[in-house]
Image (tube, grey):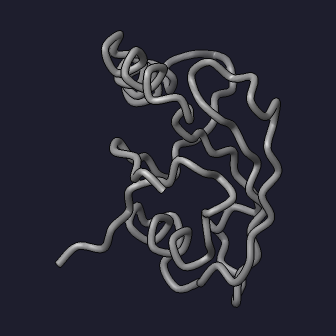
Amino acid sequence: MMADLSISLQPWSTHPEWLTRALRSTGTITDARVTSCHIELFGEGKGYSGQIARIGLNYDIAEASAPASMIAKFPPLDPDVRAASRHSSMYGREHRFYRDVAQDLALRTPAIVFQCTAPRNR
């Protein structure tokens, strides 16, 4: 049975065990385990398309590919805004940009270390 890797609607409910499973599922880490995380929200309550947080990560062992921090995007709390975002295919267009276009641009873009498509309602 596959582990539940759906993303929470609440950034502050993200925990080290989930982060470990998510980063291992994409091969970003293989041996390390996230032992703690620090979540810092940006513009809380102001984002239309979602909530954005910086997550600082601490590990039990050093691993070259393990990110020290990452920016995480969470779905908007308002169910109507989530529905409108899905209806307009906004999330899919952003995913396709990073998957198909970003690597061909001469500007720096973030690396995707994990992507989830279905939020859990917690």
The picture places residue 15, in percent across and down from the top left corner, at 61, 71
58 is higher (above) or lower (below) than 115: below
Single out the residue that lies furthest toward the bottom: 60
Quadrant of residue 35 in the image?
bottom right
Q: Quadrant of the N terminus?
A: bottom left
Give the mark count: 0
The picture places residue 52, in percent across and down from the top left corner, at 69, 37
113 is higher (above) or lower (below) than 16: above
Residue pictured at 56% horizontal, 35% vertical? 77
75 and 31: which one is in front?
75
47 and 59: which one is in front?
47
Residue pictured at 73% horizontal, 44% vertical? 53
Residue pictured at 76% horizontal, 63% vertical? 68
Single out the residue that lies furthest toward the top: 88
The picture places residue 26, in percent across and down from the top left corner, at 41, 61
57 and 40: which one is in front?
40
112 is higher (above) or lower (below) than 90: below
50 relative to 62 in the view: left or right: left
107 relative to 28 in the view: left or right: right
Residue pictured at 65% horizontal, 68% vertical? 66
The picture places residue 33, in percent across and down from the top left corner, at 59, 84
